[in-house]
Image: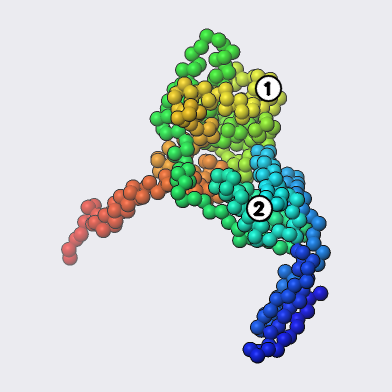
Amino acid sequence: MAFIQKITGKKGPIYKVHYTDPNTGRRRCKNFNRRKDADAFRDSPKVNRDASPSKHTVDDLAAHWLHVCKHIGRKGREPIALATRHSYERQVVILTQAVIDGGNLRLGSCLASRLDENLCKTLRDYLVQEYKRPYALKILGSFKAVLEQARSDGLMDHAPAEHIYIRASSRDPAAALTVTDKSPSIDEIKTILRILRTRLKVSDARLRRQRRRYKLILETMAYGGTRPGEALGLPWSKVDFERGGIHIVQDIEFDGTIGLPKSASAFRFIAMPDCYMRQLRHWKKLCPKSELDLVFPNWSGNAEFLSNLNHRGWRPVLFEAGIVTEDGKPKYPPKSLRHARASLEIESGANPKEIQELMGHASIKITYDVYGHLFDAHAERRATRANAIAHMLTQPNPDQHVTEL
């Protein structure tokens, strides 16, 4: 029980708050010069929390957070996708196995009531030392989400990591890379598409049909700006030959299961080139039968794995094109093809809202974060248009005839 003791000294009264520390159970006291400050501290959540420390450990809180993410959904959202689930599980392992506080404490075994700002700072320093800064930032974000969910569900009642941050390094060369640095250039895309065509010139009919399938999947991404899972999950019922495009209504997870697109904005219609639609008509005659109605199933009619697309359809093309890093690895992931159409659309004058709808971004902010530098490149073009508009508004109309009375 907390109480205030008034002590009168030579410099005036001092108000001493006696209370039980809810984290340790020890009796403590704190001095204030004003009674109202002492009253505020005595009535604060820091003092009035349940005196018995919580028995929940960080292991418990992390398991609870994962359960909510997987089966319920946080903050009214839908449960997370399978790829996100595996990413969160890896981060939770890193968090719970982290050894902090001078090597004396495994974070997962720490009681939630013992967590304070100093321990959270120790965790932050550990993450920055052990992992690259962008990944350390993600792990810390997951840790904060674990604690936020615990507070929301009454498993703890303080926020020790609320003011703990990791800032992205401005000196990291990777941080300065834009989407155009991380995706093929137009010349590289032309080379990739050319090699996809030349790889069809083989005598083995089965190999030719297999390569044609991968070619069309990659062209779906390049021409339509789709995500890899959206291309693999495309059903024939959503191919609109009359309108000349495709409807995105489902996605393929990395383990081959069919799920929903990434967000509500990802449900969209994408107009495709005539040459692509003609190839799709021809492919329909060769396509393996699929009970899932997939346009690009594997030879058993089931969903294709993203790993197969990467290793059998994408990597051989990049190796043949010589688009590799200094250590001989593929220079770009398959998803990078998705940015080809967006870049060309922006170069052709498309506005941010059009790009957001084309790419299926959940918000215009994502579009600006990814492609903002490409829109900035249009500043000189906009200045030229502004001068032309001013000229039109200030110069007399040559067709206007002025009659003097």
Q: For the N terminus, give its image quadrant.
A: bottom right
| Image side of residue 148 versus residue 206, left or right | right
Closer-to-camera residue (354/377): 377
Residue ID for mark 2: 102
Q: Secondary structure at mark 2?
A: loop
Q: How many marks?
A: 2
> In the picture, residue 130 is in which quadrant?
top right
Q: Is residue 166 above or below residue 81?
A: below
| Image side of residue 167 versus residue 121, left or right | left
Closer-to-camera residue (301/20): 20
Q: Which mark is residue 3?
A: none
Dot 1 crowding, Cα within 10 Å, few <14, some 14–19, many 20+: some
Q: Can residue 50 be seen here?
A: no
Residue ID for mark 1: 301
Which kind of residue does numbered mark 2 sit on? Gly
Residue 218, percent from left and from top = 53, 28
